[in-house]
Amino acid sequence: MEVITCISRNGNLDSFILLRPNQSTLAPHIHHGPAEGYVFDGILELRGGPEKGGALCIKDGFLYEATGADHAATKMLADTTFILQMIGPLTWILNDGIHEVQTYIDAVELWEKQTKNSLS
């Protein structure tokens, strides 16, 4: 996952911009607080898409995930750039069934690692 920037208020995982390539996915996860976002470019398939009660989030469109939302992988149907504003952590559900909590600190560490590598 390429994190373009991270912003925090009150130590919460708050705002970050992501760039994801076509056909990539974000693993199944649980939202421990609400999340809202905006798609600058591309298409996200949330919660399995409209056929499964989910949604397609398209360029210049908004998205929302409620507190406690627990859903399957989010799939990119095109190269996609989007911003998410979140309160609280996420729990990623890994292939082996293990749950891994990601906090704001984890997101900042990823961003700093990517930034350091891109400046080298």
Image (cartoon, rainbow, N blue to C red):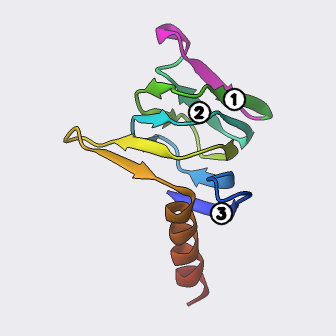
x and y percentages locating residue 106 in the rendered image = 49, 63
Real-space CA distance between mark 3 and mark 1, rounded to the nearest whole angstrom: 19 Å
Q: Is residue 9 left or right of residue 99?
A: right
Amino acid type indicated by mark 2: Leu
Q: Which residue is more in the foreground, 43 or 37? A: 37
Q: Name which residue lies at 52% across and 43% down.
A: 22
Q: Name which residue lies at 70% across and 60% down.
A: 8
Q: Earlier in the sequence, mark 3 or mark 1?
A: 3
Q: Name which residue lies at 44% across and 41% down.
A: 25
Question: What secondary structure is marked by label 2?
Answer: strand
Do we see residue 24 in this rendering? no
Question: What secondary structure is marked by label 3?
Answer: strand
x and y percentages locating residue 56 in the rendered image = 62, 23
Q: Name which residue lies at 39% across and 35% down.
A: 28
Label 2 with label 1: CB-CB less than 8 Å:
yes
The numbered mark at residue 4 is 3
Label 3 with label 1: CB-CB less than 8 Å:
no
Which residue occupies the extreme right position in the image?
60
Amino acid type indicated by mark 1: Leu
The numbered mark at residue 63 is 1
Question: What secondary structure is marked by label 1?
Answer: strand
The C terminus, quarter of image: bottom right
Image-quadrant location for residue 98: top left
